[in-house]
Image (tube, rainbow, N blue to C red):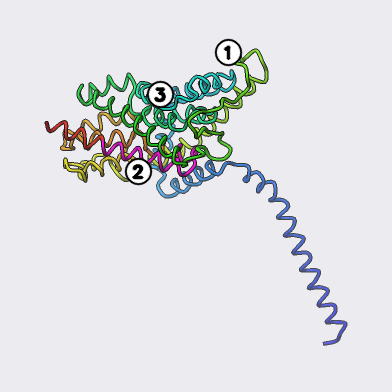
Amino acid sequence: MSESRIAGTCCTAEKTAMSAVAEGSGIVASLRPLVLWAGRIDRVVLVLVGAIAAYALYDPARAWESIVFVARNFLSLLPFILLSIGVAAYMNATGADNLVARAFRGRVLTMIVLAAAMGSLSPFCSCGVIPLIAGFLAMGLPLSAVMAFWLASPLMDPSMFVLTIGALGLEFAIAKLLVAFSVGLIGGLVVYAIQQAGGLKHALRPGMGGGCTGGGCTPKGMGAVRWRFWKEEPRRHIFRQSALSNMLFLGKWLALAFFLESLMLAYVPGERIVDYVGGSNAGSIFIAALLGVPAYLNGYAALPLVGGLIQQGMAPGAGMAFLIGGGVTSIPAATAVWALARLPVFFTYLALSLGGAFAAGLAFQAWSLL
């Protein structure tokens, strides 16, 4: 082959390669806006959409049932979510968080008792209380007192107390109220002891706010309190931003959590729980506390479920452990806490919840045998 022909062949190959590179570069350039747009989408939203799409391909009928389940549960919680978001945003916008932090400064042990008592009577569920918890920690309230409220709040409220009487009896309702206060109180004291030893210095994940770790807290915020915050544009802006960020945060995590819960309910019927927790021994009670995590629906739906399971042979102590463990560590609640708190705080929360549920189950079982 002549040198001229070789040169021509090389030139042709080089031009072809350059053309291919240019074409590839054009494709990449055309896809760049799509890549940038996808990068701006929240990862939780991407995971949720991808999971629903995959489930729809696998089982379209059940996928639609899951979507309906997510929407129904979210709407049922919406009043509590909006109330908690509104309270948190109002406190941020008015600067009232300074008053709260200043009022309890240096009185952590007293605050733990009050927080446990308030949590036992508050109308917030385990998910709806998350914006308040984030606000409390961000404003500088002690993690120990916040944990007391955090643990007690989902377990009991006035309407749930009445419904518990109807579904499980007055004795069970009173016992659950005492358990809610006790779990919150002991949990707060345990966290206080851990902090005094130098642990749990930071509660919230980066970007979620601050937190108080010592015995006293330094109030922080905008300075003077303005109860009529809507008269000042900067405070109106803070209210809007706080409410929107909390709603987006709760919305994406609750949607994902309810979707995971729908999968659990589709493949692990709640009626089968009695097969594992029919006994009155410590093992059955411990299993009931663990099963409350995936099988717990919400505080109101769980009452008739546990009532029916007790009629089928579930031990009363196991029923108490199921309600306490599930009330605090259900999939939606645990998912929200995972997104909000640092890992040491999250695992402390789980340990206190499950430990409290197990202890409550043992105590109530012993009482029922007297």
Q: Any mark on residue 264, and which?
A: 2
Q: Indicate the position of residue 67 as horizontal and vertical percent values.
A: 43, 37
Q: CA distance from mark 3 to mark 2?
A: 41 Å
Question: Crowding at label 2, few (<14), some or many (≥20) Cα neighbours within 10 Å?
Answer: some
Q: Which residues are magenta?
A: 336-359
Please tell me the numbered disc located at residue 110: 3
Mark 1 or 3: in front is 3
* Residue 355 is covered by the magenta coloring: yes
> Which residue is under mark 1?
227
Task: Answer above or below: position of 196 versus 34.
Answer: above
Q: Is residue 325 left or right of residue 198?
A: left
Query: Which amino acid, by three-letter code, is at mark 3?
Result: Thr
Q: Secondary structure at mark 3?
A: helix
Where is the N terminus found, in terms of image quarters? bottom right
Residue 114 shown left or right of residue 230 in the figure: left
Residue at the spot 61% in from the left edge and 27% down from the top edge: 241
Q: Residue furthest left?
A: 370
Magenta span dominant secondary structure: helix
